[in-house]
Amino acid sequence: RRDWFRASGDPIEDQWLLPGGKHLRVVAQPIPDGGLVLIFEDQTEQVQLASARDTLLRVQTATFDSLFEAVGVFEGNGRLSNWNSRFVSNWEQDEEFFGSHPHVDALADKVTPLLADPERAKVIRDLVRSATLDRKQRSGRIALASGRFYELAAVPLPDGNALLTMLDITDSRNIESALRERADALEQADKVKTNFLANMSYELRTPLTSIAGYAEMLEAGMAGPLSDQAQDYAKSILEASGRLGGMIDRVLDLTQGTSGGLPMEQKNVELAMLAHDAVRLHKPAAEAKGLEFVAHVEPMVGAIRGDARRLAQVLGHLIDNAIAYTPPGGRILLHADGDTAGARIVVSDNGPGMDAASQARAFDSFSRAANARDGSTALGLGLPVARQLVEAHGGTLTLLSEVGEGTAISIELPR
């Protein structure tokens, strides 16, 4: 450093990095009369802090640019101060425009031609102003003419600035639209199915009535005396006609209930009498299968306003279900009680019970019940129809069951 001694004029400054990692700032000031003044300043800590700060800034910048969302930071005066690369690409502008730190109004005017609805440009202005001036968080949506959809959100920052984010929701929007179209198609298909079932049920009723009528005439001997075997045939025809007629009635009830056209009377219904009649009608079938059928009806069950025939159908469906699924030697209990607010009727059994999957399907229309103890595989219309009829009375029907513990179905009816 001999030239430092010969220098004249301003001080000379240099940076020295020592082998141990120490950073020194060296200032050399020649003395006019000869000699040199050297000043050594240890800047190791400042250099390390500056390096750490630069590293942190690079990491933040890289993180900012790699965000899935487009992000722009607006100052309190509405000017864009910072942004990431996705913010630039989403608005399809060049870096030069953003490098001028445009005001939010200028940005909105610039991107207006890109929008599917140019009037939606005001959403950008409103969001930024709400976050910078009103200090309120708001969100909105815009659609570009290219078919892209974005969810915008403006968030006020502690330093008075505002953060505007853009999230591309095109894929989820398209999926939502496809699902909505599929739901509409399924709804239309369900209406077609319901109308078809209703019409089919009406069409089946006429020939079924004729079959049952002729079978009754044959059984009554109107066509002449029948042999024992022929009598059995006529009886079998009547039984099959009765089962088919009951199924047609359930299909009609289900389709009418779905379409909101189920006819309902509004009269006083004595529930105790209704419960006793249901027990009397179904007890022979239960005893024929070797089941104990017990009824416990309290006077407080009282009366409600409703349709006695429909409520009798409900109890019939529930009792038939219990008889079908309870093994011989089992027990069925019909319990009825109530209070001033409403009445409750519970049909329970100590049968095999139902697992969670079976309970989930119990109220599905036309689900096939293949595990009944009587070996039947009839379409499970009883519980869906029962629930519709109970709900038509403003009540609720609840199923509780556990494998190996039996099943209980509770009906709650308001006064």
Image: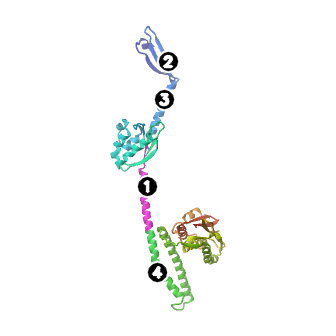
Tell me the crowding category of disc 1: few under 14, some 14 to 19, or many 20 or more residues within 10 angstroms, Cα based.
Answer: few
Q: Which mark is residue 51?
A: 3
Residue assigned mark 1:
176
Residue assigned mark 4:
207
**Residue displayed at 43% across by 9% down:** 32
Q: Which residues are magenta?
A: 165-191
Which callout, 4 or 2, points to the residue nearer the camera?
4
Upstream in the sequence, badge 2 or badge 3?
A: 2
- Residue 2 relative to residue 232: left or right: left
Residue assigned mark 2:
40
- Residue 58 relative to residue 295: left or right: left
Upstream in the sequence, badge 1 or badge 2?
A: 2
- Is 180 colored magenta in this rendering? yes
Q: Amino acid at mark 2?
A: Phe
Q: Nearer the viewer, residue 364 or 294?
A: 294
Quadrant in which the N terminus appears: top left
Q: Amino acid at mark 3?
A: Ser
Upstream in the sequence, badge 4 or badge 2?
A: 2
Q: Nearer the viewer, residue 284 or 411?
A: 411
Q: Quadrant of residue 291?
A: bottom right
